[in-house]
């Protein structure tokens, strides 16, 4: 473990050296501030690095990650990131990105108790309950899990659209689109699920807020 720690310290030094060779003003520009066009809400899984997946540079993606890329209306961490991204950084896109083979999704399909995380997993189980009929009709467990990953992302996009932060931005005609993606860990390809919101027109009336 100590060897790994020392290795990453050395890797940082090499990265700085190589970066400055290519662009002597690189860090000087970064230090002046950020104006990313994108907020990424993704899974905490170490195999899903937001910037690398889409070939983005530092400063181009504002990131929030948690287990199974959840958008929970009582999660102050997620809401704080969202508020800053939308109202201060003025991002134009928010992507909720899940991934196939997600451990949180797989855990939500079992009855096994893991510990404190059970309370987080319960939110994912709620998504299964909503789509139980469709999911239970998929006999192959791998296909069922993959579909659950997709449905979870779709629900999180809807939950994102329900937030007062996003709806207020739309209400002031801010250019903001939210999207749902799934990343394939086994092939590196992202799949756009086709759930894209530019306004609240796709929301049920009860969720639309008056400002």
Image: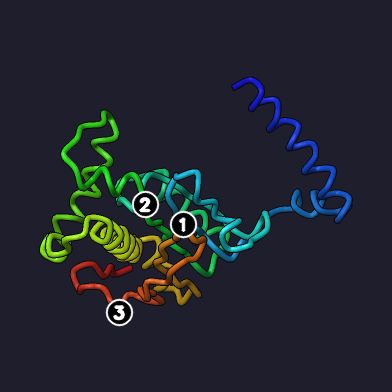
Q: Which residue has dot 1 on it?
A: 186
Q: Nearer the viewer, residue 85 or 12?
A: 12
Relative image position of residue 68 (x, y in whole percent):
35, 49
Whichever of callouts 3 and 2 sits on the residue coming sooner in the sequence is 2
- Relative horizontal placement of residue 206, taking residue 165 as reference (left or right): left
Instruction: Locate the N terminus and report the quarter of the image it occupies.
Output: top right
Q: Secondary structure at mark 1?
A: loop
Q: Quadrant of residue 127?
A: bottom left
Q: Residue at x 42, y 65 (%)?
A: 181
Q: On screen, 75 above or below 210?
A: above
Residues under numbered marks 1 and 2 in contact, where contact means CB atoms less than 8 Å apart = yes
Q: CA distance from mark 3 to mark 2?
A: 32 Å
Q: Which mark is residue 101?
A: 2
Q: Quadrant of residue 88?
A: bottom right
Q: Residue at x 28, y 47 (%)?
A: 106
Q: Nearer the viewer, residue 159 or 67?
A: 67
């Amino acid at each position: 473990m100590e060897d790994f720690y020392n290795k990453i310290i050395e890797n940082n030094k090499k990265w700085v050296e190589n970066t400055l060779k290519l662009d002597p003003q690189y860090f000087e520009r970064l230090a002046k501030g950020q104006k990313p066009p994108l907020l990424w809400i993704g899974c905490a899984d170490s195999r899903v690095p937001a910037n690398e997946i889409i070939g983005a540079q530092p400063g181009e993606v504002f990131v929030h990650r948690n287990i199974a890329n959840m958008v929970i209306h009582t999660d102050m961490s997620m809401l704080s990131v969202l508020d800053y991204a939308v109202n201060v950084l003025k991002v134009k896109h928010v992507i909720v990105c899940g991934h196939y083979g997600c451990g949180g999704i797989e855990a939500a399909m079992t009855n096994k108790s893991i510990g404190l995380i059970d309370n987080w997993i319960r939110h994912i189980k709620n998504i299964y309950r909503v789509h139980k009929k469709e999911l239970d009709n998929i006999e192959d467990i791998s296909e069922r899990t993959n579909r659950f990953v997709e449905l979870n992302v779709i629900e999180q996009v809807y939950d994102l659209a329900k937030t007062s932060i996003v709806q207020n931005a739309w209400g002031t005609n801010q250019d903001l689109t939210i999207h749902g993606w799934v990343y394939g860990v086994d092939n590196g390809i992202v799949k756009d699920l086709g759930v894209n919101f530019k306004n609240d027109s796709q929301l049920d009336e009860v969720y639309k807020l008056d400002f």
